[in-house]
Amino acid sequence: MDDMENNSLNQNAEQVEPIVIETKFDKENFFRVSYLRWKIEWLRAKKGISILVIAALIILALGIIAAFNHEGMNPFILLGGFLCFLSLAFFMYFFDKKRRFKVALMLIAEKNIEIENVFTYSFSELMVSYRDKVCASELTWGLFSHYSIYENFLLIFIDEEVSSALICEKTKDDAEVYEKILALVDSKLHCKDIKFRGRLNK
C-alpha cells in the first residue's frame, strides 16, 4: 500500500511543470554572487576575531599594569602577546585567502567566457537539477538541509557551508520566477537564519 502511495505521489510530482532557468554566463553576476559567499564567510569569522582582539588587549593591559606594580614580568603579558599574535595571524590568513579567492574567480570567469557557458537550473517537486557545457548534476530535496534568505538572495544549503550552497538572486526582471522558486523551496525545506557567531541575520 505504501509503495502504491509513493508511486502515485511521484507520478503527480512529475506532472507538475518544473521551474526552469537558463542563463548565459555573466561575469558581473558571477562576481556578485561569489563575493556574497565571501562576505558571509567573513562575517561569520569577524565577530570571533573581534572578541579575540578585545580579550588580548584587556589581558595585555592587565599584565602591563601588574608588571609595573610588582616590578616584574607577569604571565598575563605573555598570554596577551600570544593572543595579539594569534589575532594578527587570523587577519593575515583571511587577507591571503581573499587574494587567492580573487585569483581563482578570475580563472573560472575566463574559462566560462572562453567556452561561452550556459547554465540551466530546473526546480521540480522531486529535485533540483543543474546543467552546463562542462557538467550536470541532480540533487533530490532530501540532500538539502535548509534554506536562508540574506538581503535579496535565496540560499539553499546542503550543509552549513555557504561555499556549497545554491544561490538565487531576486532582481526586477525575474522577481516572479524568484517567488515561485521560493514558494517551492519553502514547501520542501525549513528556513534557518544565517548565524554570524552569536548574531542572527536574515
Image (tube, rainbow, N blue to C red):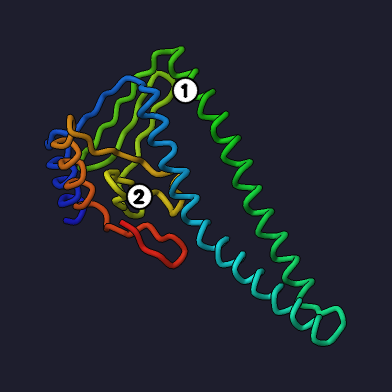
Neighbor class of circle 1 (other Cα within 10 Å; few <14, some 14-19, many 20+) is some
Q: Secondary structure at mark 1?
A: helix
At horizontal 64% and vertical 74% (from top left) the residue drawn is 58
User: Relative to residue 133, is residue 185 depicted above or below?
Assistant: below
Residue most toward the bottom?
A: 70
Query: Can you give x and y, in whole percent of width and height, for residue 127 in the image?
Result: 28, 40
User: Relative to residue 13, is residue 62 depicted above or below?
Assistant: below
At label 1, the amino acid type is Ala
| In this view, the mark in front (2 or 1) | 1
At label 2, the amino acid type is Phe
Locate residue 140 relative to residue 180 in the image: left or right: right
Report, in whole angstroms, how far the alpha carbon at label 2 lies from the one at label 1: 27 Å
Locate residue 171 relative to residue 118 in the image: left or right: left
Locate residue 59 relative to residue 42 in the image: left or right: right
Question: How many marks do you count on the picture?
Answer: 2
- Residue identified by numbered label 2: 144
- Residue identified by numbered label 1: 109
Q: Quadrant of residue 80?
A: bottom right
Looking at the image, tell me whether mark 2 or mark 1 is earlier in sequence order: 1
At horizontal 24% and vertical 42% (from top left) the residue drawn is 126
